[in-house]
Amino acid sequence: MVPQTALCVVLVAAGSAWRQPIISNELNRGMQDGSRATTLSVLSFMGTVAGIMLNPLIGLAGDLGLGITSVSLGCCLILLGLGVRALV
């Protein structure tokens, strides 16, 4: 079980390291120079607030069991993806 967990952690970290420069580049290209710092600060603040609200819920789901946690997080990600797609 431990090797699979370690592999998942490595894959998540590698995916984030690969994805982050691409997202940053796209954000920077779409912003005007005068508002870049403010926009990045607001985005960082929103991410922090989302983490503050969601981390206790994820912990609560984790206390209920791994199956419930994985299903609930999967459903939330699907709904988030559909919501983002509807906005774009």
Image (cartoon, grey):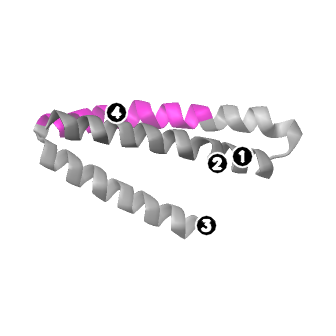
Q: Which mark is residue 25?
A: 1
Amino acid, disc 1: Asn
- Determine the residue positioned at 29% across, 40% down: 7
Q: Is residue 86 above or below residue 22?
A: below
Do the CB atoms of the residues marked 1 and 2 lie less than 8 Å apart? yes
Amino acid, disc 3: Val
Element class at badge 3: loop
Q: Main secondary structure of the magenta part?
A: helix
- Determine the residue positioned at 34% across, 54% down: 76
Do the CB atoms of the residues marked 4 and 1 lie less than 8 Å apart? no
C-alpha span from label 3 to label 4? 27 Å
- Determine the residue positioned at 38% across, 61% down: 79
Q: Earlier in the sequence, mark 2 or mark 4?
A: 2
Mark 4, residue position:
55
Span highlighted in magenta in the image: 44-63
C-alpha span from label 3 to label 1? 19 Å
